[in-house]
Amino acid sequence: MSSDPANSDLIWDMDQFHHRKLATEFVKRFENKLCVYSESVEQIYSNYNIYFPEDEGRKMVILPDPYSYHDTFQGIPSEAIQTTGLTIVPGELIGKRGLHLTIPLKSPEGKKKIRVVPLQAGMRAINKLRPHNSPFLPILMKGDLREIKNRVPALHLHSVRVDRLTHRSAMERSGIQQVISEKLPKIQ
């Protein structure tokens, strides 16, 4: 299975993972629940499959559904994508069940601190603090699947800033927001 080299953003390297099986099981939980962004072709995919083909070595390949062109948002510049510092981790990392969100906190001493909250509650709280025209719309990009302390898989989150899609109509921006928002409650 050879992928289009022009869209290498959809081929993620798994070589660095010490616990590859845990990482693959973890990331499969998010298939079609978090959209994936490809910077090289400026597209967001909302309908895709995740494969781990043997002939590609230790790679994860994201294959957008070719029959669901309406589930692909095109012309999304990288300026509309921002890093969040937020990470989804399995509760087992902190002695709990389910998925959790790590939220970086600013410390007066300059020390790195994080707050860990249940995933759905954390996403709702973040969106309550955000302006209506700039909701928290998490997506994944190549490199977002990580391993904490060489053992626990985690997903770093990026976010689409619909307020930065000024070249798109209000209806298109609303469509992107709606698709991403409707998927979020499905993440368990």
Image: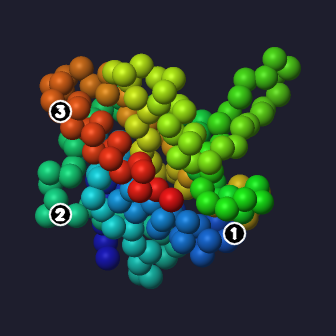
| Three-letter amino acid code of the residue under disc 2 | Pro
| Three-letter amino acid code of the residue under disc 1 | His
Question: Depth-wise, is mark 2 or mark 3 nearer the camera?
Answer: 3
Q: Is residue 165 visible?
A: yes
Residue at the (41%, 56%) spot, across then down: 186
Asked whether the residues under the numbered discs 3 and 1 touch, taking CB atoms below 8 Å apart as contact, a structural biologist would say no
The mark nearer the N terminus, 1 or 2, is 1
Q: Along the horizontal axis of the image, is 114 left or right of 136?
A: right
The mark nearer the N terminus, 2 or 3, is 2
Q: Which residue is mark 3?
A: 172
The N terminus lies in which quarter of the figure? bottom left
Q: Along the horizontal axis of the image, is 56 left or right of 47?
A: right
Residue at the (55%, 66%) spot, across then down: 26
Q: Is disc 2 surrounded by few (<14), some (14 to 19) or many (20+) residues within 10 Å?
A: few
Question: Depth-wise, is mark 1 or mark 2 nearer the camera?
Answer: 2
Q: Which residue is mark 2?
A: 66
Q: Position of residue 92 (x, y in %)?
A: 72, 63
Q: Along the horizontal axis of the image, is 180 left or right of 127?
A: left
The residue closer to the viewer here, 66 or 176, is 176
The residue closer to the viewer here, 169 or 128, is 128
Q: Which residue is mark 1?
A: 18
Q: Is residue 14 visible?
A: no
3D distance between C-alphas at marks 2 and 3: 21 Å
Name the secondary structure under disc 2.
loop
Quadrant in the rendering for residue 122: top right
